[in-house]
């Protein structure tokens, strides 16, 4: 990797850390972002993302243990069923993941953080024959999104139904939701969060039913959202990608910045 590419990645990561982690905007209405000592955390409803999104870059072992203990106490205090510490590959100290595990957090599958400049992305939407994209604007659309998500990921999508319905009701201006339909069947879905004042928009939830994969639907969902982000004046698109989607995103022009691993603390049921 040449020096220009390396320095560009370094700048992009610094911009992301500052705008989307240390000074993180709330994910939606009713969500709070709090600075709690050496960390920044988000607190919201049960269907919102609750967790730590940033920790001080000079965190040492003693301060890390104290911060972890405080976040566990916070989770117990507010009655949050699950609380995530979003650990990035460059976070310190180097053994922060091991310290989270020792405190009762569980590591989930790591993902890759990718960022692209919106101006450099293709926005032409090309879909396979018989498939159309629909913007989700109401509860019926949220139901279709949840069904598509369940087909793509094999997990209950009720949380997505609740989240999308709430976002459409409370802050539709900064939220885009899409479902790909083959006839009357939802086969793929995705959403985008637009974060005013940051320059960033986040791509989330892109997933396609197994029998429809490999036909360009995922790429079309990215292109549509890139077009919206360009129209709204956003500079960057950010994605936390699985290993299935990472190669596609790289081919589309996204740059790998680092990894991110969810460490989740779950309260014991009473």
Image: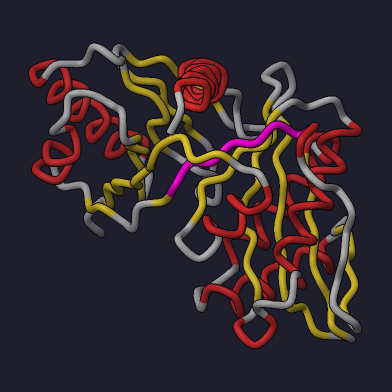
Say whether residue 115 is magenta.
yes
Give the residues drawn in magenta, as a range.
112-118
Depth check, front residue: 38 or 128: 128
| Residue 131 vertical position relative to residue 47 in the rendered view, above or below | below
Residue 174 quadrant: top right
Looking at the picture, how far across and down is residue 60, in whole percent? Answer: 14, 16
Q: Residue shown at 38%/42% (left/top)?
A: 260
Q: Residue shown at 59%/36% (left/top)?
A: 115
Q: Is residue 211 visible?
A: yes
| Residue 60 vertical position relative to residue 240 in the rendered view, above or below | above
Looking at the picture, how far across and down is residue 207, in whole percent? Answer: 62, 67
| Residue 215 vertical position relative to residue 261 in the rendered view, above or below | below
Quadrant occupied by the N terminus: top left
Say whether residue 113 is magenta.
yes
Q: Residue shown at 16%/29% (left/top)?
A: 94
Q: In the displayed structure, does residue 252 sit left or right of residue 51?
A: right
Q: Residue shown at 61%/80% (left/top)?
A: 151
């Amino acid at each position: 990797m040449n020096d220009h590419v390396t320095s560009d990645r370094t700048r992009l990561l610094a911009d992301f850390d500052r705008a989307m982690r240390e000074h993180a905007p709330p994910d939606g209405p009713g969500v709070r972002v709090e600075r709690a000592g050496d960390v920044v955390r988000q607190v919201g409803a049960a269907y919102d993302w609750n967790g730590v999104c940033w920790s001080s870059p000079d965190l040492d072992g003693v301060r890390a243990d104290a911060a972890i203990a405080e976040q566990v106490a916070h989770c117990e205090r507010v009655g949050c069923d699950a609380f995530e510490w979003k650990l990035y590959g460059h976070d310190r100290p180097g053994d922060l993941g091991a310290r989270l595990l020792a405190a009762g957090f569980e590591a989930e599958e790591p993902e890759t953080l990718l960022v692209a400049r919106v101006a450099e992305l293709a926005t032409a939407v090309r879909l396979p024959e018989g498939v159309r994209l629909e913007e989700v604007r109401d509860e019926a659309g949220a139901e279709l999104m949840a069904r598509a998500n369940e087909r793509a990921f094999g997990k209950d999508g009720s949380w997505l139904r609740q989240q999308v319905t709430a976002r459409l009701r409370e802050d539709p201006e900064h939220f885009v939701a899409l479902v790909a339909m083959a006839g009357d069947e939802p086969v793929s879905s995705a959403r985008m969060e637009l974060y005013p004042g940051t320059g960033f928009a986040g791509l989330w939830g892109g997933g396609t039913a197994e029998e429809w994969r490999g036909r360009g639907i995922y790429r079309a969902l990215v292109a549509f959202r890139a077009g919206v982000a360009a129209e709204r004046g956003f500079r960057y698109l950010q994605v936390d990608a699985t290993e299935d989607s990472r190669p596609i995103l790289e081919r589309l022009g996204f740059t790998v910045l680092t990894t991110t691993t969810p460490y989740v603390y779950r309260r014991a049921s009473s």
